Each structure stands twice: as C-alpha cells, then as structure tokens.
Image: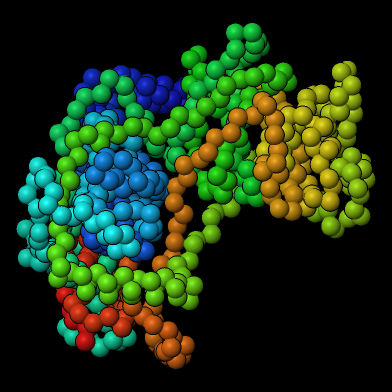
Amino acid sequence: MKTIALYLFLFIHVGIFTMNAQNSAEDLTMNNIRVPHQEQVYLHTNATMMFVGEYMYYTLYCLKENTGQLSNVSKIAYVKLVNQDKEVVLNFKIKLENGIGDSNFFIPSSIPSGNYKLLAYTQWMLNNGRNYFYSKDITILNPYTSNQAVFRSQTTDTAPEIVRQDLNEPTVRPSLSISLNRRQFGTREQVSLNITPYPGQESSGNYSISINKVDELEVKVNKTALDFRKSYPKKQSLKQQILPELRGELLKGKLSVPDSVELGNGPTIIGASFPGENYLFKTATPDNNGVFYINVDEDYSSDDLFLQVISKNNADYDIVIESEEDIDLNPLQFKSFELDKEMEAIIKERSIYNQIENAYYSSKPDTILIENRNARFYGPATMTYPLDDYTRFSTIKETFVEVVEHVWIQKNSNDEQEFHVRPLPPNLDSGELPLIFIDGILVQDAQRLLDLPAARVESISISRNQHFYGNKTFQGVVDVSTFKSDYYTYYYSPYIKTHKLFKPNGGKQYYQQSYEGDLKEKYQRLPDFRYQLLWLPKFEFKGIEENVSFYSSDISGTFEISLEGFTKNGVPVSLKKQFTVE
C-alpha cells in the first residue's frame, strides 16, 4: 500500500510540473489539485543612492501572493543589477530559508555613474511572464570618472523623480513601534532602539533593520513593504511551465549521444561531481529527449561541475547544463537623476570617507559563515585510513596492498587494472566494481588512481556496501582525499564535461562596531566614517519588546532607522525614525 501511495504522489507532482501551461501559474490545475501558490518577492535595501566602493545590503522576502505570508515553495531567488542599456551588470543567486534570504554586493569602480534597476524574482514567478519580477530604481555615482553626462539633461519617458523618503504614517496601522532613548547623540555614542508591540495586535514576524545617514543628495523613493506590489506588471500566459526550485538549486541539462554510440540496456545514468574537500556527488537520469535535472540543496565550494556518463564504454557524449531562465528586460523604464554644482562638496567628502573606510576594512571585516559539512553520499565509511598514521609507501598500489583492508587490485580480461571491494557479510562478492573518487571526482579509469603519487594522499575511506543507480550496481566505494583537495584542478578526461557554476552567495555575519569597555581604547586611533551604522538582515520579532543597540560613528548629521518586513500573518510593516548625531 505504501508503494502504491508513493507512485501516486510522484505521478501527481511530476504531472503537475511538466504539463503545458494554459493560463498564469496560479490557475494551473490537474485533477482538481492546485499547484503550489504563486509568489512575489520584496527586496529591502539599505539605500537607493550608492557610490562605487560601497556595499549594497539587501534582504529578500519571498511571499505567498495571495496571503503575504512567507512562501515555502522556492528555495532560490535571483537578484540582478541592470543598467540603462538593459544589460545585466551584476548577477546573484540567493538561498532562501523559510522564504527569506539576504546578501550584499560591493560596487566596483568599473561601474560607471548612472541610473540602474535592481531586479529580484524566483523561477516560479516567471510563469506569470518573463517580466514578472520585483524592480526598484538605484542610482550609482562613480566620482572617479570625469564623464557624468548620464545625469545631465536626459530625455526620459518619465519626469525626474526628485523626492525625499516619505516619513508619513503608513496607510496600514502598524502592529509595532520603534523608539529611541534620545533624539540627539554624540559621535561614537551608544544608541538604544526599542521595538515595542501594540497591545492586541499580531506583531511577531520577520523584519530587517537598516540605519544609515539620510542622503544629502536628492534620491529616489525606497519602496517599502507597504507599496512594493505596485511594481509588478500584469500577468501573462506561458506555453511551457517553468519548474519551481523546491529543493534548492535546480540544474537542467541535456545529454546528446552520437548516432554511432550504443548506450546499452537500461536507463543512462549521469554522474555529477561538485569536487573539493566538502564535495557533493549527484546522479541524474535523462528522459527520452536527453533532458535531466539535478537538485542541489547542500553547500559546496567548487566553482566547477564535472559531468560524465557512468559507463564501462567511454564515448564522446555531449553533456551541457542550461543557463538560467531568461527574463524580459525590454519593458524597463528608468528614472532620472540630476547633478548640480552644489553637490560637489558632498560627493567629494563621501568619496574620501569611503576610501578611508575601505583602507581600514581589515580591522573590522564581515565574517563569512562556514559552509555546512556534507555527509558522504555513501553514508558512514566502513573504514578510514589517515595515511600519516601508517607507514608511508611510495605508490598507491603498495599502499592498498600494505595498509587498506578488504580492497584488492587485479587485472581484467583486457589486461586493465581494477579495484575490488569485499562486501560486508552476509553478502557475497558479485564481481561488480566499486565507485572510485579522488577529491570528489568520479574516476572510472582505475589506472588514474594508481598513477596518483601516494605522497599527495591524505586519507582513504572505504565503503563496503552495495550502491544502486538505475540498473547499475556498484560493490563499494573507494574515496581518496589529497592534502590540498585539488585533484580536479589538473585532472583531465575527454569523456568528462565541465560546467562553470553560478553559485548562490554565501552567508555572512555583518560587522557591528562597538566602543564598549576595552573596545573604546582599542579603536581610539582608528577613524570611523561609517554612513551605515547598522544592518540587521534577519530580525525575528516574537511579539515581546526588544532592544537593539548600536554605535554612532564620526559622521555627524541626520540618520534614519528603517524597519521593513511582514508579520507572520502576512501584514506588511514599514517604520522609519530619524535622529541626529552632532
């Protein structure tokens, strides 16, 4: 009965996601079963006016379109910076956890001054049209180039938008409030921010907090959680459904087989290696058209993917991974921004402060979060041999003979060397060969392992279990790790195809300046020209009053607190408050 239920579940879900779309994605049905809800995303950024040499921080909220609650469908989102020529300048992939993702990017000096768009979407959203994405206007100023003509006397379809941030009360009654212990502070002084729920209202939810200097340059409105839906276009119909990334990254590929090549009986299996110390190994089975999918929900460090057909008969297969889904940039319309002579001193001062901050970045860097360790695909190793714990031998063959148990090497009928792994009792030796890996690369020619200098090898792990892929059986796994975990950088086989990966951004712990206790003396001689005083990308509020503290910098002027996000019921929240530093 369980088997029947499983087949029915797979049939329904695969059927839903491969059918042709007749309407927008939210209307697709099959046997009265609706597909997962449609999504919209909102991007909270720390600013809309940026200088080269600065960091753009952002939090992405992926929401159920019908309720505004966080979506559990997509696990990947995309963020792009697009210039006025409608070219993608910067391109990012973001992991979503429970509907939220965050990251940042540095604006390099190679980017010219201009008006840009910051776009955000999930693949699942594109079923409503290739231009169905979140969009916001960003202005970038590069003071290190003489050409600022892009800001002067432009002809646009839209009148110049020269406005300040709207500080009026939101149209939706907020469920929480923000307050400060004072409205005026000195430089390098601690500021206490209180977040308080309103009685009788649901205020628990997910928010992000940005605290930075109010821009003295006239900038565009930073869209809030209250009005972001206005940026979406009308929905369109697609002929072919785009699959959601339900379990992490979804890589779509195509296997092409020459007419002269016989694949043999049973399904073709493609091995996909994400090599390195923390490697991944995946398999995929192409359909009758050669199309296959690889789901990746784990962390990986490699920039390259190695693909090969798992077969005893090597052939010149063509295996490619398709690029990400296209989006339609043609409807984009850009706002204008104008420079005048009065801005010169402001621009010069901010540029100098940015250079000083970047010069001292090593004294107060962000922390890159360590990626999660991946369990080996074959489960716990039966045995692991750290070779430095044993007598070292000059060759791999001697090492296996003298050190590694339950593995032997012998020649086959073609006079080729083969590895064999003894199965765990009560299983009998089937005569099948093991899978061999070196730093995560699947190696189908045993001679390549035998040719590896033993001095490079740090450890050898053995699995004596049987492994099944399609109609193929493998008796055990031989997993070899080198000291540098870099075998893939110089390994070559004409039967292995490589693909440069478009990786999700890694997580970060953002630096928070403090002058508490001994830190005051430690940083006394270091300049502090932060315009961005605090960035909290993920602030989970549980409906109980909370306090967030931060420190002002050496910059004086007016600063603004911006809290954006959504309650657990999907109600948008947008709060702002200003204070001064003298």
Q: Residue at the spot x=48%, y=76% of the render?
A: 363
Q: Is residue 542 above or below residue 421?
A: below
With 401 as the anchor, is 430 left or right in this view? left
Q: Residue at the spot x=60%, y=8% of the render?
A: 259
Q: Position of residue 421 (x, y in %)?
A: 81, 34
Q: Residue at the spot x=34%, y=28% of the render?
A: 242
With 470 as the anchor, is 475 left or right in this view? right
Q: Is residue 170 above or below residue 484?
A: below
* Res. 415 in view: yes
With 322 as the anchor, is 51 left or right in this view? left
Q: Position of residue 124 (x, y in %)?
A: 31, 35
Q: Position of residue 404 (x, y in %)?
A: 86, 44
**Coloring applied to the structure:** rainbow
* Res. 71 in view: no
Quarter of the picture holding the C terminus: bottom left
Q: Is residue 75 above or below residue 190?
A: above
Near-viewer residue (204 or 311): 311
Q: Position of residue 186 (x, y in %)?
A: 25, 88
Callout count: 0
Among the 4 quarters of the image, the one containing residue 220: bottom left
Near-viewer residue (424 or 310): 310
Q: Residue at the spot x=18%, y=77% of the render?
A: 558
With 532 as the anchor, is 580 left or right in this view? left
Q: Residue furthest top?
A: 260
Near-viewer residue (201 or 148): 148
